[in-house]
Image (tube, helix red, strand yellow):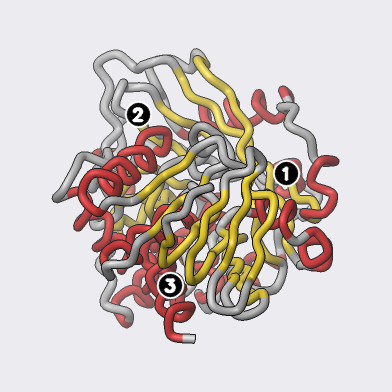
Amino acid sequence: MNHKKYDLIIVGGGILGTFHAYHALKKGLKVVLLEKNTVPQGATVRNFGQIVPSGMDLKWQNIGRKSLEIYQEISQLTDITIRQSGSIYIASDTEELQLIEELSQINKSNNYESHLLTQAQSIACCAGLKKEYAKGALFFPQEMNVDPSLMIHRVRKLLIEKYQLEFFSNNTVKDLEDKGNEVLATTANNQKFIASKAIVCNGSDFKILFPELFNQSDLVVSKLQMLRTKPQKNYTLAPSVLTGWTIRRYESFYECPSFQSIKDKENKEAYHNQYGVHILFKQVNDGSVILGDSHEYQDAVKADLIGFDRNEDLDHFMIEESKKIMNLPNYQIDKRWVGMYSQCKEQDVFEQQIEKNIHIVTGIGGKGMTGSPAFSEMSLNNIINR
């Protein structure tokens, strides 16, 4: 029996759980973080590591911009692999040029720095970018990227060493009981933790603890495929590169006046639309380049049906499309993987209060890496003030 009482139990050691812990600890709360695995295994570590408020609608862009500040704040305390290398959207035709020009005007109204680049400037900015593909670009200099396989572990280490976070791995929570003035968490190995409040920040834990509510939720699971090349010799790609299909996919462009008319003309049956493919490039610290990605969806209650198998035809398609855009020194693939994240059909994030002192916050989806730091602060304040 763990007799120590905490102010807050957080279930799930991914990015949402870790940043809820970060903001709670900064408020002086005593926090215990319970993670079912040795280290997080889900979307937190299986993504591109791009921090791109530019891709979000205005509400989430503001949240993402605040997250940029929080990442910078933490990077002053420890190396969390942050690089402010910027993000660049490459237009491949006149329609995409029109959309980036419209988004540039929207950015000016929102006081978010971006720069329209000519074809020549785009090629100069992105080593290997093919002239026949690039017609122009929109560059966001403030945006960042991280190594997701390292970032979350380094943030958690900081919280343990500087803020006295208590972290218990390999502890699956099997029961949360609200006793009126406190919450009792019991793990599968029969450890017990007591706190004033508890927050469940992981979809798998949500499913275990509250299966009926989980089955009724509007959560869906998205399956992504990504690839990483072998290290590229004598090659540097400074910004994160997002391309034409990204311009036609990301929510920020939905706010452009021409977006819907352009979208309506698309062939919905095209292979890349069927699998939600948009081509991204990001170079990581060892010189390799991450390529991807794709999106397949399934209701969360049937998530097991989507499977963890990779579609090799899809991998081949993404590699061949990447070659049309970028001349990399090599396209030898060193690693291939599948990532999964949950998101809501209708809501931005799944948030629900269970009884008085138990809260669920999950399903942030593709906004997680960019939005979680600032969103978690807002979420925590709402929970504490209830």
Q: Amino acid at mark 1?
A: Tyr
Identify the residue position indicated by label 2 in the image. 128
Q: Is residue 374 left or right of residue 9?
A: left
**Badge 1, how many Cα within 10 Å: few under 14, some, many 20+?**
some
Could you say where residue 328 lies in the image, as x and y percent from the top left?
A: 40, 22
Q: Residue at x 34, y 73 (%)?
A: 107
> Could you say whether the residue bearing mark 2 is in a helix, strand or loop?
loop
Residue in the foreground of this view, choosing between 313 and 353: 353
Q: Amino acid at mark 2?
A: Gly
Could you say where residue 324 lies in the image, as x and y percent from the top left?
A: 52, 31
Eyeballing the image, is 229 above or below 363?
Answer: above
C-alpha span from label 1 to label 3: 35 Å
Q: Which mark is residue 275?
A: 1
Q: Is residue 245 left or right of residue 114?
A: right
Q: Residue at x 63, y 66 (%)?
A: 262
> Could you say whether the residue bearing mark 1 is in a helix, strand or loop?
loop
Could you say where residue 304 lies in the image, as x and y percent from the top left?
A: 81, 41
Identify the residue position indicated by label 3 in the image. 380
> Could you say whether the residue bearing mark 3 is in a helix, strand or loop?
helix
Between marks 1 and 3 in the image, the one whose residue lies nearer the viewer = 3
Q: Residue at x 73, y 45 (%)?
A: 296
**Badge 3, how many Cα within 10 Å: few under 14, some, many 20+?**
some
Asked if disc 2 and disc 1 are in contact, CB closer than 8 Å, the reply is no
